[in-house]
Image: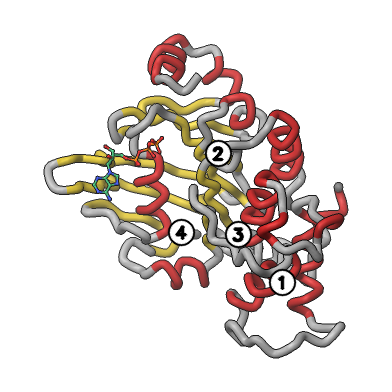
Amino acid sequence: MAERSSLSATGLSGARLSGAGVAHALRLEGVSRHFGALVALDAVDLEVTAGERRAVLGSNGAGKTTLFNAITGDFPPTAGRIQFFGEDVTSLPVHERIRRGLRRTYQHSLLFRGLSVLDNLYLAVRGVSRGRYSFRRPRRDDAALRSARELVHLVHLDHVAGTVVANLAYGQQRQLEIGMALAGAPRMVLFDEPAAGLSARERRELIEILRSLPRHIGYIIIEHDLDVALRVVDRVTMMHNGRIFKEGTPGEIENDPQVQQIYLGGGHG
Ligand SMILES: Nc1ncnc2c1ncn2[C@@H]1O[C@H](COP(=O)(O)OP(=O)(O)OP(=O)(O)O)[C@@H](O)[C@H]1O
């Protein structure tokens, strides 16, 4: 798996990180999001370094997805500031954040069900490159097609590259969603509950895929399954009632009584 880091055609080589000269990939200062009277995010401060792998955990309604929406711009914050690699992106639209190397997956699928695995990834690569959404037939040496093939490999779908999405197992569809988010040299990816609905075997595969991603791509993962989350990250951020109340290594978090009470008592079994 080591050689997955030499993904030059995919643009996953890490070159975009060098020279950035910023300590933090992501910095949130006092970020809040209100929905009417409801405070879904309450003055959140968060710093994630380049290449870091972070889990955001918390019970239902803690504000995790709202945090993702604020970072990506799907639902901009009502207060506070967000910097991405040193640049203030607080009021940038979603596509401008994508252009700067931020990606996400959603809890619901955004795949083209009538197309093959390779075609989905090809369109994802084309979608984030200059000639957006051209439906001309690719030549065999097309760089985007090469990138798509690398992504197929990265998410362990080589054996079903030609299979139409509708005929994939559920877990394979989730793997493909990860591949879609990795198209076009991301610097940070937000994974929203990638293990939801997976079997035990599919979860093991997911852990392997996440652990073997190129190290320079940082990610933040929301995941209710602690067995997955704590195995694929460097640090963990705990949320409750729209606030961050604890941060630590997976080991520290796993053994923390307050975490056990709030998180495991939150009904996620
Ligand atoms: N679009 C919205 N309109 C109104 N309220 C919302 C909206 N999105 C989220 N909320 C509310 O904000 C709070 C935080 O929700 P959020 O989805 O961020 O929590 P979460 O930690 O992701 O929960 P879960 O684990 O269930 O996905 C909840 O009370 C939720 O009902």
Which comes before the other along the chain, label 2 or label 3?
2
Camera-side residue: 245 or 141?
A: 141
Which comes before the other along the chain, label 3 or label 4?
4
Is label 1 or label 3 in front?
A: 1
Is label 2 or label 1 in front?
A: 1
Colour scheme in use: secondary structure
Residue 131 appears in which quarter of the rendering?
A: bottom right
State the separation of the CA atoms marked 1 and 3: 14 Å
Q: Which residue was labeled with disc 1?
A: 119
Marks 3 and 2: in contact by CB < 8 Å? no
Residue 44 sits above or below residue 165 on the image: above
Q: Which mark is residue 181?
A: 3
State the separation of the CA atoms marked 2 and 1: 30 Å
State the separation of the CA atoms marked 2 and 3: 17 Å
Locate residue 221 relative to residue 241 in the image: left or right: right
Residue 94 appears in which quarter of the rendering?
A: bottom left
Locate residue 249 relative to residue 183 in the image: left or right: left
Which comes before the other along the chain, label 1 or label 4?
4
- Give the amino acid at mark 3: Ala
Q: Is residue 23 visible?
A: no
Residue 118 appears in which quarter of the rendering?
A: bottom right
- Give the amino acid at mark 2: Arg
Q: Which residue was labeled with disc 4?
A: 84
What residue appears at the point 63 percent right and 61 percent down from the top-left corner? 180
- Give the amino acid at mark 1: Asp
Tell me where residue 29 appears, x and y as whole percent. Answer: 32, 47
Locate residue 137 relative to residue 91 in the image: left or right: right
Tell me where residue 45 appears, x and y as whole percent. Answer: 35, 41
- Give the amino acid at mark 4: Phe
Is label 2 or label 3 in front?
A: 3
